[in-house]
Image: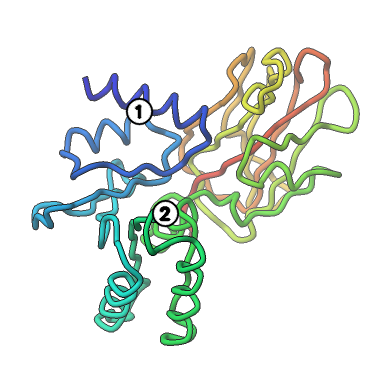
Amino acid sequence: MMDGYTRMTETYLQRSGLRVATIWDDASPALRQAYEKNCRNLYGATVQNFKDMPSVAGSVEGGRLRFDKLVIPYAGSYEHLSGSLAREIRRWKRGEPLFLSYQVDVWGDLRVRRLIELQEQMKRDFPGKVEFVRADHYFNLYNEAQGLPFNLAMSAATDAGEGAAQLLDGTPATVWAAPEAGKATLLIDLGTQHQISRCVLRHAGDAGMDPALNTRDFALQASRDGKTWKTLAVLKGNKDNVTDVDFPPAAAKHLRILVNEPGGDSVARIADVEVYGKRL
């Protein structure tokens, strides 16, 4: 039943574009394992704890998926939230980053304007120590800080011609298309050396276009110096809107995508690229 439920959840996540979920009111070890197994689209999940049970805790499943216990579920007032944040920050040992996730009651006092005021107050009270980030970046930064695989594409650069930024903007709503028909090559610079082990390609169909335009044949290659390349995976006859590929860990500073057979009109299109790895 858990497998069936989490597979359905993954379908919803893919269609909605959501990358983070909140689970009421704790999650059993078996359920956490099912989310990790079947919800590949999840960056992380927060776990509510209305009764403040000591047994409710954060965890990392499968070496990649963080379940983060909410400090407060549905904080109802500015004072409640700001007081909690201040106490947590003052107790912080500062040996490593402190990650705090909260949930707020946006139907009451804590509307967007008040949350912006809270951010400004925290930055005044704790200068240079506090950053508010959106949920997908929160879990990506957590994984990076803990030495877990994270999406390197969030800070990578690319050399794929005009419109190439659309490859790494985190959404399939924008699509990169080759300037001419035929084979195409995309180069992604990861900035520094990493050990990469997974790549997700979102094709034209994931952007709402005709699935016949999905990239059919392509290869993934890695390089430490941009000169010598190692083939990580070769895929042929693809019809899926999303290709999620695991491969043996490989050291890389550069990733190359060789489109050998584009979609139905012979123009290569890719809506988004995710590259997962750890810093070396």
- Residue 38: numbered disc: 1
Disc 1 element: helix
Q: Is residue 58 left or right of residue 99?
A: left
State the residue in front, 237 or 203. 203
Picture residue at 9% right of the left edge, 55% below the top: 53
Picture residue at 63% right of the left edge, 33% below the top: 220
Amino acid found under the numbered disc labelled 1: Asn
Q: Is residue 94 above or below residue 8?
A: below
State the residue in front, 101 or 192. 101
Residue 174, located in which quarter of the rendered image? top right
Picture residue at 65% right of the left edge, 21% below the top: 205
Residue 91, located in which quarter of the rendered image? bottom left
Picture residue at 61% right of the left edge, 45% below the top: 170
Label 2: which residue? Answer: 139
Q: CA distance from mark 2 to mark 1?
A: 18 Å
Amino acid found under the numbered disc labelled 2: Phe
Disc 2 element: helix
